[in-house]
Image (cartoon, rainbow, N blue to C red):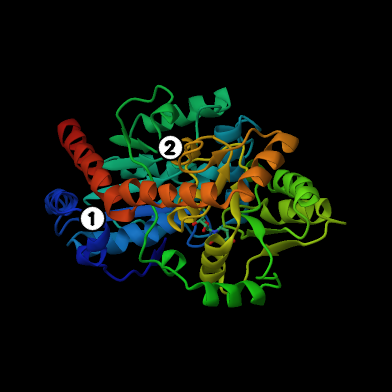
């Protein structure tokens, strides 16, 4: 297990976004875990929404006096090939139970031997960590699911349910994802206003960052920022961009993505996107850029519209981040996006049909007042519901419930 180092973050740092009531509630809930050791375990230290959440949540837990630790499974290509199949089967109904399941267990057994035994609570994130459950049988354990299980492939789902019999609680982002699993809590993810990625950037600085990426800051652009993954549908974004460009000449299209260590399919998807973009003008396909935080921030801040064309989305932190910056958010209403983008109120929802979606986006792009109103409402919606301390407060309720269940069982 690889331990990630994190510095504590004080609750006071968030005071400008919290009411006194919210702060008091969080302090009260954190009291239960003061001095307790809580291990959060996931499968990568870079890339993807889970990392974003943990790198904000754990410092705040520490700041509240909880001895929170972040452990990451050591990388292993064969293991990640299996867990990506799980991911695809559970979230997309594609693939079935991996054939190489024996290796999944061999690997997790090896890893489990290095988990510290002094925890008061263990939170395991996503299917990659499910194999650790039997090795923590004498401890309170939570499984935190970040993906959408509504279309799970039946054999893989049955396998998941068997594994979950031994956890004290499971946490999902949406009620509809729980798929009949018992003993669940719902906690929505969040963005951290204190991360450089979400701090406000002046237009001048943002434009410099944009220019350094090879994009013309004086012309409008639409963007999607996401891992290169088929569920994010970057090729669909190119299709709509191509159509909007016939209505708004000079409009640029920017795709920015990165690879997560535990996602072996990213590079192949990136190559497919490059070939789909061949012949397109004013189109920038970027991957793993050097100053990632500022690039994401600048693009979300200055985009004429931010698109999230995912066909499936556990929650969609990229959507939350863009809304935080008051962007005009245009997204398909799937998974967690449903909670964020309310059509005509906090953004606009898309249909997945290229011609129709291109027309809708072009229409709003030409109505500056509407775009500004939607962006302002988007920011408010995120501030109220989807920032780190709000999420942590809900987590702590679920954590306490898990500890109580574990105490009854033992
Ligand atoms: N992200 C990034 N650089 C990129 C692409 C994505 O930093 O090139 C970040 C993005 O800002 C967000 C996270 O990766 O914080 C993606 O989280 P999300 O929930 O949208 O999707 P996931 O990758 O977990 O499916």
The image position of residue 238, as x and y in percent, is 74, 49
Assign a secondary structure to mark 2.
helix
| Rendered view: 289 above or below 317 | below
Q: Please identify the quadrant where the N terminus is shown.
A: bottom left
Indicate whether 326 appears above or below 287.
above
Sequence-wise, the earlier of marks 2 and 1 is: 1
Instruction: Residue under label 2, please give it.
Output: 339
Q: Nearer the viewer, residue 9 or 409?
A: 9
Residue position marked by numbered label 1 in the rendering: 18
Residue 186 in view in this figure: yes
Q: Secondary structure at mark 1?
A: loop
Residue 226 visible from this viewpoint: no
Q: Tell whether 254 sits left or right of 41.
A: right
In-image side of 248 versus 148 (left or right): right
Q: In the picture, residue 230 is in which quadrant?
A: top right
Q: Residue at x 33, y 25 (%)?
A: 182
Q: Is residue 326 above or below residue 311?
A: below
Q: Quadrant of the C terminus?
A: top left
**CA neighbours of label 2 inside 10 A, class few (<14), some (14 to 19), many (20+):** some
Residue shown at the point (38%, 57%) measured from the top left: 54
What x and y, as percent, mark residue 401?
Answer: 20, 37
Q: Position of residue 12 (x, y in %)?
A: 20, 65
């Amino acid at each position: 297990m690889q331990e990630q180092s994190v510095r504590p973050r004080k609750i006071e740092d968030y005071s400008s976004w919290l009411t006194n009531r919210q702060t008091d509630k969080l302090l009260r809930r954190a009291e239960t875990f003061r001095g307790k050791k809580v291990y959060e375990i996931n499968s990568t230290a870079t890339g993807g929404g889970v990392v974003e959440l943990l790198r904000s949540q754990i410092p705040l837990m520490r700041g509240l006096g909880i001895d929170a630790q972040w452990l990451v499974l050591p990388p292993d290509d064969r293991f990640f090939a299996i867990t990506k199949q799980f991911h695809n089967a559970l979230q997309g109904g594609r693939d079935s139970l991996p054939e190489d399941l024996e290796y999944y267990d061999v690997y997790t057994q090896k890893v489990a031997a290095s988990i510290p035994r002094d925890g008061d609570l263990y939170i395991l994130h996503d299917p990659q960590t499910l194999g650790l459950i039997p090795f923590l049988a004498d401890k309170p354990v939570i499984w935190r699911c970040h993906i959408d299980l509504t279309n799970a492939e039946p054999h893989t789902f049955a396998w998941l349910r068997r594994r979950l019999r031994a956890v004290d609680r499971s946490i999902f982002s949406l009620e509809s994802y729980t798929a009949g699993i018992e003993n669940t809590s719902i906690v929505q993810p969040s963005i951290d206003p204190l991360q450089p990625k979400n701090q406000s950037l002046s237009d001048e600085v943002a434009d410099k960052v944009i220019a350094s990426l090879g994009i013309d800051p004086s012309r409008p652009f639409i963007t999607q920022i996401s891992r290169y993954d088929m569920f994010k549908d970057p090729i669909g974004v190119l299709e709509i961009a191509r159509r909007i460009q016939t209505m708004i000449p000079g409009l640029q299209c920017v795709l920015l993505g990165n690879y997560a260590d535990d996602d072996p399919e990213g590079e192949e998807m990136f190559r497919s996107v490059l070939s789909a973009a061949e012949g397109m003008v004013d189109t920038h396909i970027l991957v793993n850029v050097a100053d990632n935080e500022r690039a994401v921030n600048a693009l979300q801040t200055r985009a004429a519209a931010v698109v999230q064309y995912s066909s499936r989305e556990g929650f969609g932190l990229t959507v939350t981040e863009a809304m935080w910056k008051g962007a005009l958010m245009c997204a398909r209403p799937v998974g967690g996006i449903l909670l964020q983008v309310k059509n005509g109120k906090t953004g606009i929802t898309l249909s997945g049909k290229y011609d129709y979606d291109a027309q809708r986006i072009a229409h709003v792009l030409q109505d500056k007042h509407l775009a500004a109103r939607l962006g302002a409402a988007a920011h408010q919606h995120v501030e109220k519901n989807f920032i780190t301390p709000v999420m942590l407060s809900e987590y702590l309720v679920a954590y306490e419930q898990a500890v109580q269940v574990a105490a009854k069982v033992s």
